[in-house]
Each structure stands twice: as C-alpha cells, then as structure tokens.
Image (cartoon, rainbow, N blue to C red):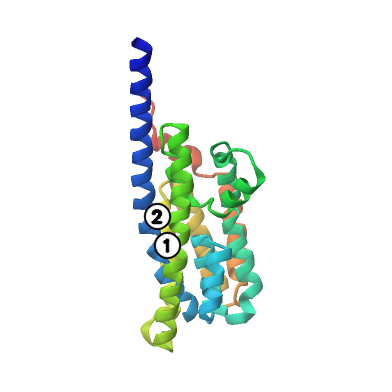
C-alpha cells in the first residue's frame, strides 16, 4: 500500500507539473507571438515585400535577429544587406548555446533534433528550464516552441499586410520604429551591470560611427566592441558582489 500511495502521489505531482508547463507555454507563446505584428509592419517599412517578411519569420524564426536585420535595412537600404545578415547572424548564434542546454530535454533522433533546432529560441528554452520535472520540461519546450512558431508567422503576415496597406510608412514613423522595437525587446534582458555596460558601449560606438561609415558597418563594429567588452567582463565581478553580498 505504501508503494502504491507513493506512485499515486508521484503521478499527481507529475500531472500538476505538466499542467503548469502547458499554462506557461500558452501564456508565453501567445504574448510573444503578438510581437509578430510589429515585425511584419516594420519589415515592410524597411523595404521588404509581404512574402519576404513572411519568409524571414518562417525560415529565420528568431525575433531578435529578425528585428536586428530589418533595423539595419531601414537605415541603409539594400546596400546594407551584408551588414544586416552578419549582425543578425551574430545575434542568432545565442540559439546554439541554448541548444546545449535543451539537448537532454529533446532526446535522441535526428528528425526530432532538426525540428527542435527550428524552435530553440529564448522563450522555449526559458519555459522548459523553469519546469521541475523532465516530462514537464519536454512539454514546456515543445509546446512553447510550437505556439510561438504558429502565432509568430500568422501575426507576421497580419502585420505585413497592414504595413503594405499603409503605403508610405515613413509618414507614420514606422521607418524609425524598427530600432525602437528592438531596443524594447532588448532592454528588459539587461538586468546585470555588465550587460548594460556592453549595450551602452556598443550603442555609443555605433552612434559615433554612423555619420562616418557606410550604412551597416557601424553595427558590425559595435558588435565587435560588444564582444570585447563582454568577454573581458570588466564589471562582472563587481556586479556579482553587489547583487549577491556575502552574509
């Protein structure tokens, strides 16, 4: 009887954990997908066609990288394509790091891993790692990724159609909104002093070089500065001591 009671209790805890993962997945997935409307409209404002905006969301499927790409295009036009691609690629490389953490959750099988690679993003990783049990982590990863993927692509199409119907989006300020939207996505993630230092240093360098270099190059130089400041971790130790003082 004791073992049966333990099994029942374990089953109940597992079911509760899975239910919580489902709730988290839909809450995060729906909220994130809503940003797709902004991306679709801003992509059209940056010079992309509706189908190009939708193709980016379908193939790239990394919100931060997508906003970074259209942000460069909005400032430099088609001449900035190389810098836009390079910048978005650098930003998207973080998903490879996420893959290391989510690999045990995904499990074996190359088809499963290919599908998982497509939806390994900030949100699916965060929801998965926040769950208490392996089964709940699997539910959180896959369900969040699927909800965001489906919703993001639908809202991208909606936003692109809206932006296309508006015509000259510069009249509404949307030509400058791509950078603002990206900053809005980035700023809440800068919780540590070192991260804020990296962002400020890169931003200052980009602002100073924009009048001097051709469109797109300031972003690449700023990315290099961000890497140097980030790797040297000038403020990391001080930040840790402030955030977690010893008793």
Q: Name the spot of residue 231 as percent of width and height, x first.
A: 60, 46
Q: Name the spot of residue 98 as percent of width and height, x first.
A: 55, 45
Q: Residue at x 58, y 51 (%)?
A: 115
Q: Which residue is mark 1?
A: 151
**Cβ–Cβ below 8 Å for labels 1 and 2?**
yes
- Of label 1 and label 2, which has the lower sequence position? 2
Q: Is residue 123 left or right of residue 222?
A: left
Q: Residue at x 52, y 72 (%)?
A: 54
**Residue 136: mark in rendering:** none
Q: Nearer the viewer, residue 119 or 48?
A: 119
Q: Secondary structure at mark 2?
A: helix
Q: Is residue 16 left or right of residue 155?
A: left
Is residue 213 among the parts visible in the rendering? no
Q: Nearer the viewer, residue 230 or 22?
A: 22
Q: Which residue is mark 2?
A: 29
Distance CA(mark 1)–CA(mark 2) = 8 Å
Q: Secondary structure at mark 1?
A: helix
Instruction: Locate the N terminus by quadrant.
Output: top left
Give the vertical position of 232 relative to 1 (above or below): below
Q: Nearer the viewer, residue 55 or 236?
A: 55
């Amino acid at each position: 009887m004791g073992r049966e009671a333990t099994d029942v209790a374990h089953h109940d805890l597992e079911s509760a954990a899975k239910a919580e993962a489902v709730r988290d997945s839909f809450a995060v997935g729906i909220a994130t997908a809503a940003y797709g409307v902004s991306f679709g409209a801003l992509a059209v404002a940056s010079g992309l066609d509706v189908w190009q905006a939708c193709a980016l969301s379908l193939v790239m499927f990394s919100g931060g990288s997508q906003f970074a790409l259209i942000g460069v295009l909005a400032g430099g036009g088609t001449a900035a394509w190389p810098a836009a691609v390079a910048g978005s690629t650098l930003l998207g490389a973080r998903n490879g790091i996420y893959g290391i953490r989510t690999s045990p959750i995904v499990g074996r099988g190359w088809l499963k891993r290919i599908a998982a690679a497509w939806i390994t993003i900030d949100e699916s990783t965060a929801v998965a790692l926040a769950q208490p049990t392996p089964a709940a982590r699997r539910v959180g990863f896959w369900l969040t990724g699927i909800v965001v993927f489906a919703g993001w692509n639908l809202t991208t199409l909606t936003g692109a159609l809206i932006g296309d119907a508006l015509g000259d989006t510069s009249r509404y300020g949307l030509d400058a909104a791509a950078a603002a939207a990206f900053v809005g996505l980035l700023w809440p993630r800068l919780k540590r002093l070192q991260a804020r230092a990296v962002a400020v240093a890169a931003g200052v360098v980009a602002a100073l070089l924009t009048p001097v270099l051709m469109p797109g190059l300031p972003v690449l130089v700023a990315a290099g500065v961000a890497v140097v400041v980030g790797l040297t971790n000038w403020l990391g130790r001080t930040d840790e001591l402030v955030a977690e003082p010893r008793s």
